[in-house]
Amino acid sequence: MRSDTVTKGVGQAPHRSLFNALGYTKEELERPLVGVVSSYNEIVPGHMNLDKITEAVKLGVSMAGGTPIMVPAIAVCDGIAMGHIGMKYSLVTRDLIADSTEALAMAHQFDALVMIPNCDKNVPGLLMAAARINVPTIFVSGGPMLAGHVKGQKRSLSSMFEAVGSYAAGTMTEEEVCEFENNVCPTCGSCSGMYTANSMNCLTEVLGMGLPGNGTIPAVFSERIRLAKHAGMQVMELVKRDIRPRDIMTEKAVLNALTVDMALGCSTNSMLHLPAIAHEIGMDFEIDFANGISAKTPNLCHLAPAGPTYMEDLNEAGGVSAVMNELNKKNLLHTDCMTVTGKTLGENISGCVNRNPEVIRPVDHPYSETGGLAVLKGNLAPDGSVVKRSAVVEEMLVHEGPARVFECEEDAIAAIRGGKIHSGDVVVIRYEGPKGGPGMREMLNPTSAIAGMGLGSTVALITDGRFSGASRGASIGHVSPEAAVGGPIALVEEGDRIRINIPELSLELDVSEEELALRKSRWQPKEPNVKTGYLARYASMVTSGNRGAILEIPKKN
């Protein structure tokens, strides 16, 4: 066993003495050592229940003959970090999580791992680490939050942000905002719509790294505890059969994840995280893949914020397995991919029934024939930009209007709430990318302000920052190259006409090449507003093309 390096032989007597200090017995050290990577903390609602998940996993590992050893992983709550400097730290934690977990696992020579994540950067960070470490590994998330209820309607965190915008617009009272505040987040768990955390937990299941139900069983259901025990038991089966993450997370599995992403209508942040995960397995993932897959993949789900259904509804309808089984009717998936069940994806989904065609549309009656995400290109985004097409109202799929230019999120929000943005405008927020922010903040606040002011179906927003899965409307993010490296978004001037055509996948600035070249010659780099500490180092490391904010790390063998 790998752990023999620290448990067997006279030369390892000092190591064993330290295990003795931890209270481990000789019998425990003769079993496989399983690192249980717990993201439990008391600041993230999606993680406050992970202590119970961790204990259930440990019990499952012990029942199956392993020795579970809990080690920690960090996580940030994007909602609490929103709208201030804290959001600059959110995306960068993905790489910190991957690095620190790799360090823990390699330093202590675990034979296997159980990853227990739940929220936005925590899930992809641990998937990246799993690919690097490549010992038998299984994931079990903490599960989604139940939807809240306000005035008889299901609600979620995005409703809360939009309520603040409505209050600023004078269409909601403080008492009504308070009612939202007290009811939209009623339980622990990752926020209840198809936001980034739930997107990545569902895609973990598609990648084959989580058991069926990993993405959708609500956090407060006892079924989630049972799932955790089974994950603990199953990792020992992976050890026995020597099934490792790189046997599971193959190029075909990544393409499956992108396909199901389109059907579910996942967060645009998946277009940051899937390339980073692919990078760890040596796959050259370009975001252009999205359009080819979207063209043949129907959008089957309109989960909040795109529609009125929530993760609990998806779970009751049959979950991710039912969605995959619908897609498989059109042979859109690579069903021969291995999974942590020890079976292929095709074997896992065989016979999974769609129990609610209103939540999961049948494949021959989709919301649209094309997928939930689109990558737009043009002279404003020569390397691409991403929009959640499934959350855009029909009248905004094609839009042209004057640019209203802002150098940061705060200035844009002040203008929106101050009534300075009007129907037809295109709000441009720049210098919010990985290098320019630094840290690539999420733009949920400005999109929510636009929606709250009643402008969601008439105003577009374009940024080199990123969008939350909770954002809706014509919100185009991840514009690359970013402003901080001289991308065309840095050259936009107030009043320039911008043309958006989502069906034709184009994003154009109505300015001649000669004029753009002249503006480029006059452009001066803008100093980042964070010049010291980890963020400054991060800004210096990200690639100029920010192909998903991936740090320049060598591909793994």
Image: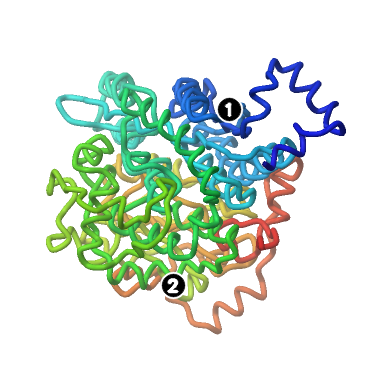
Which residue is pictured at 30% across the width and 21% down the height? Answer: 174
In this rendering, which labeled residue sits more in front, label 2 or label 1? 1
Q: Position of residue 273 (x, y in %)?
A: 50, 53
Q: Position of residue 70 (x, y in %)?
A: 60, 26
Left or right of 370, for residue 494: right
Q: Position of residue 304 (x, y in %)?
A: 27, 42
Can you name the residue that lies furthest to the bottom here? 514
Quick one: label 2 or label 1, which is nearer the N terminus?
1
Of residues 272 and 516, the one nearer the viewer is 272
Q: Which residue is mark 2?
A: 377
Left or right of 547, for residue 453: left
Q: Which of the 4 quarters of the picture holds residue 315?
A: top left
* Quarter of the picture holding the N terminus: top right
Residue type at the position of mark 1: Pro
Q: Which residue is mark 1?
A: 68
* Quarter of the picture holding the C terminus: bottom right
Which residue is pictured at 56% across the width and 45% down the height? Answer: 136
